[in-house]
Amino acid sequence: MRWNHFGSGIRPATKANVGILLSITLQMTVRLLAQEGNTSVEQFQRFASGNEPIKEATVYRRISLTDGTIVNQDWVRFGYQDGSWYAQRLSPQTNDPSHLVPLRGNDIAGASFTHMWTISDKNVHVAEKSIASGSVPDKYSQLPHDLMIRSIALGIPVHDLGAIRWQNSEFVAEIVSSRRSENDSASTNTLKGTLTLNANGQPSRVEYPDAGSIRGAVVTYEYDASTNKLPSAFTIRIKGTEKLYRYQFLSLSLGKKELSETKGYVPTMFADMSLTRVATVWTNDRPYTVRDGGTVPAFDTSNPRRMGTLIFGSLAFGVITFLALFYLRRRTQVKQNKKT
């Protein structure tokens, strides 16, 4: 028996109605059982939320049209752990396209637990995370950082990992939808989407609607033995467009690295320290360059004003630590000069 909302009493349920109800109940039960204790789903959700440490991954991103025309290609290698990361763009070697080499003219970008940084053979730039907006580490890390984040988030359009909250087959994510200029705070929107499993209980599809300036999309996943329970590739098709964004994991090594001594990934892990570099530290006032044992305002060579002295320590302790200590020393020296 069931209540008839359109009548004033009760009426017997038909066999057809009972059959439909049982079918729906069975489908829901199977779906919940497929997710409960499903290690593929659990690892997928941990990975996309940034909770699976990555020693190193190499990803190929291809933008193409539905007719197969390639619009753009990118390669990036990266590592991520506890909010610390590094990312470097790559390109196929000219005489051996199967071998990837660092893209010429591009710095390695990254972040320790406290600082953002970029390093090349000629320069190293460092900025505290809290004041990094608009700095060289902020601007020059945007593309490799975005490639890394989209790869880890498995196509869900978040700007920072940890912004995704899962509830069984549904998720909610806080996304950055628009920013008028680098001086404006970004506006955020809530994005809601669903995860679908294939017959093997693996995540096969994510779909989300429009949210703010973010267009809705469908993300489909591919699997092979190389990435264990995680997708080996995925393709994003943004609704209302003819473009396809395909991300392929060429390699993926999971697990933690020992980063406690360096307090995260730092430039010395990726650079030839025998090279002489111009070191620039970005502050909430302006950038300063280390020069001849002292510091001067960066990009001001006409009449540089020395802002204090620096006793050079060993770069083996890491450029991040080196420049962070230098910045504190400079700030202390300025305060002492004001007192005198």
Image (tube, grey):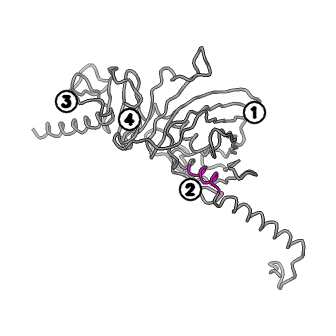
Magenta span covers which residues? Answer: 38-46
Give the labeled residue for mark 1.
66
As drawn, which residue projects farthest toward the bottom? 9
Q: Earlier in the sequence, mark 1 or mark 2?
A: 1
Tell me, yes or no, whether the two marked residues, 3 and 2, touch with CB atoms within 8 Å. Answer: no
Classify 133 as above or below 72.
Answer: below
Residue 280 versus residue 259 in the image, above or below: above
Q: Amino acid at mark 4?
A: Val
Q: Is the residue marked by circle 4 packed among few (<14), some (14-19), or many (20+) residues within 10 Å?
A: many
| Disc 1 and disc 2 in contact, CB within 8 angstroms | no
Picture coordinates of residue 111 (x, y %)? 41, 38
Between the residue at mark 3 and the residue at mark 1, the CA separation in whole angstroms equals 59 Å
Residue found at the far right of this picture:
15
Report which quarter residue 230 is drawn in. Answer: top right
Q: Taking 304 as reference, is 203 left or right?
A: right
Q: Secondary structure at mark 1?
A: loop
In the rendered structure, find residue 165 and report the number of the disc placed on it.
Answer: 2
Closer to the eye: label 3 or 1: 3
Q: Is residue 174 magenta?
A: no
Q: Mark 3 = which residue?
A: 311
Judge left or right: residue 275 versus residue 181: left
Count of numbered circles in the view: 4
Image-based side of 80 in relation to 121, left or right: right
Q: Which residue is mark 4?
A: 266
Q: Which amino acid lies under the numbered mark 1 shown in the image of this protein?
A: Thr
Q: Label 4 vs label 2: CA separation?
A: 30 Å
Q: Amino acid at mark 3?
A: Ile
Amino acid type, residue under disc 2 in the picture: Arg
Query: Looking at the image, do the residues carrying marks 3 and 4 touch, with CB atoms under 8 Å apart?
Result: no
Query: Which numbered disc, 1 or 4, marks the residue closer to the eye?
Result: 4
